[in-house]
Amino acid sequence: MTALLDINQLLDELETGLREVLERRGIENPALIGIRTGGVWIADVLNKRLGLKQDFGELDISFYRDDFSRIGLNPTVTPSSLAFDTEGRDIILVDDVIMSGRTIRAAMNEIFDYGRPASIILATLIDLGARELPIQPDVVGKVLELETYQRVKLRGPEPLHIEFQETGQ
Amino acid sequence: MTAIDPSPNHLQLTRGGQLRHFLTLDGLNRELLTDILDTADSFIEVGERSIKKVPLLRGRTVVNLFFESSTRTRSTFELAAKRLSADVLNLDISTSATSKGESLSDTLLNLEAMASDMFVVRHSQSGAPHFIADNVTPGVAIINAGDGRHAHPTQAMLDMLTIRQHKGSFAGLKVAIVGDILHSRVARSQIRALNELGAEEVRVIAPGTLLPRDVEDLGCTVEYDMARGMRDLDVVIMLRLQKERMEGALLPSEREFYRLYGLNQDKLALAKPDCIVMHPGPINRGVEIESAVADGPQSVILNQVTNGIAIRMAVMSMAMGGQMAERQQKQMEREGGRA
């Protein structure tokens, strides 16, 4: 069984939330970084909606995963690409889904290897809870509580949509 | 030394097809070679960052086990391991334990007892890394950093990465390897890699005295005349004259060799205008290659050095990852067996 969540509604929530955080913190020139793959699609949309002039960055966190010692190297790693200097910048880090928080931890470790940012704002389209680390997004599109047999998956980039799946187990 | 298995994939690959050791390119398919190149591509970007490190091998110990001296190869392996955050131990075995009478097996047992995770092995005897991989404790990865006349797989792969960067793909490429094929472990690995990755033609250009018997069986054509051999080339790979490996007079003189087989601007002009020039180093200027060519616009020799670090990072992390994944798999099977 598959049901669709309204992606545009979630993106509206993210955009509104981000604008509020940026205004509250007095940040005028943030740089967006998306985590591959879904986070990059969301970053692309948000970059346009927020009217940011520079290209967003793309992170592949494969070299920073904490499960390398158990499963080895991700076979489809591609180079990260940040076309701007992170040193002293206000960063908006974007991912499609947050659950354990381990991906975000890896991403922040990688960002700091490019330089020390002034701040990082975390924006995720969906928050599934089930955190294993003390990492919380600043802005979310929607908080979901799933049963063990339920999954969500962002599909894209064109059209961008969310699949809500029930495995039936 | 044990005989070399020409395709020791039972030894160097896990059951899932991941690298466990990296001993030779023989038997490795195009998909795996491409995975190595793609992973290395990602590591190039790491070398351009403010902090040129990733945490993949943090807490692991890599031992550079060099039974034969090689400053350049050892340095790039050391830098690669350090950029992967590993602890690195450099052992020049020719001046240490074995010269005091300790056997190779005892040296290895002692290093394993120090909880080493990876040995990078350079040895003058063909097959030495195979022997070590066959006898080492499970979980320790062996990387071949050049053995005798047999193989130098990381050098060949960094050459492939350099070619792909400049030519996009291997389809339709005509590549020549020039010079001392007889003593070159690099040439054997290069020929193997170029054929597997789909080059149109691999040509060797050398005097008969510097060619192995039945060289065509390696998968190449042979040309004795440099001017004819340079035609239509996309890539020319010059080899170093391995004078230290030559027994007896295989060449009339270095000057004669340079006149006939040295790469100068006139000979390079016979190849395609965008032909790239490669050399594994160290260069003997005026023996294998003219300075104007080595330092010229078609030379990619320094790119090869940079790519050497990225390829070695890729191979080390893939082999270590394969070892870890295999250990995890075995543990799951044991637990499944107990359940």
Image (cartoon, coloured by chain):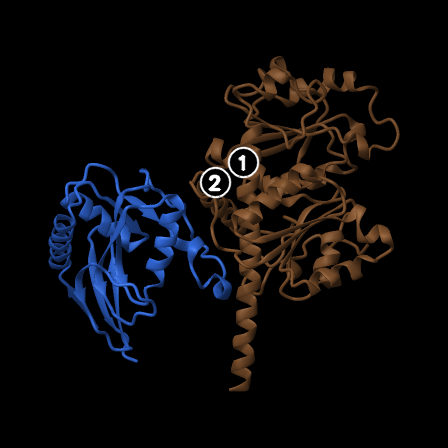
- Residue B108 horizontal/vertical position (percent): 74, 60
The image quadrant that residue B118 belongs to is bottom right
Asked if residue B186 is positioned above or below residue A153 in the image, the reply reads: above
Q: Chain A is drawn in which colour?
A: blue
- Residue B282 horizontal/vertical position (percent): 67, 30
Which residue is painted at 74% across and 28% down in the image? B241
* Local crowd size for mark 2, using a 10 Å CA cut-off: few (<14), some (14–19), many (≥20): some
Which residue is painted at 35% across and 45% down in the image? A116
Tell me: B227 left or right of A1. Answer: right
Dots 2, 1 in contact, CB < 8 A: yes
Question: Is residue A123 something one can see in this rendering?
Answer: yes
Q: Chain B is drawn in which colour?
A: brown
For marks 2 and 1, the one nearer the N-term is 2
Asked if residue B278 is positioned above or below residue A2 in the image, the reply reads: above
Which residue is painted at 38% across and 44% down in the image? A114
Query: Which residue, given by chain and number where applicable, does mark 1 sit on?
Result: B306
- Chain that bears disc 2: B
- Residue A123 horizontal/vertical position (percent): 22, 56
Task: Give the amino acid type for the residue marked by disc 1 in the picture.
Answer: Thr
Task: Name the disc covering residue B47, or none.
Answer: 2
Task: Name the disc covering residue B283, or none.
Answer: none
The image quadrant that residue B309 belongs to is top right
* Local crowd size for mark 1, using a 10 Å CA cut-off: few (<14), some (14–19), many (≥20): some
Task: Give the amino acid type for the residue marked by disc 2 in the picture.
Answer: Gly
- Residue B332 horizontal/vertical position (percent): 52, 76
Describe the element under mark 2 as helix, strand or loop.
Answer: loop
Which quarter of the figure is the N terminus of chain B placed in? Answer: bottom right
Extreme residue toward the top, this view: B266
Q: Nearer the viewer, mark 2 or mark 1?
A: 2
Tell me: A157 left or right of B95. Answer: left
Which residue is painted at 25% across and 53% down in the image? A94
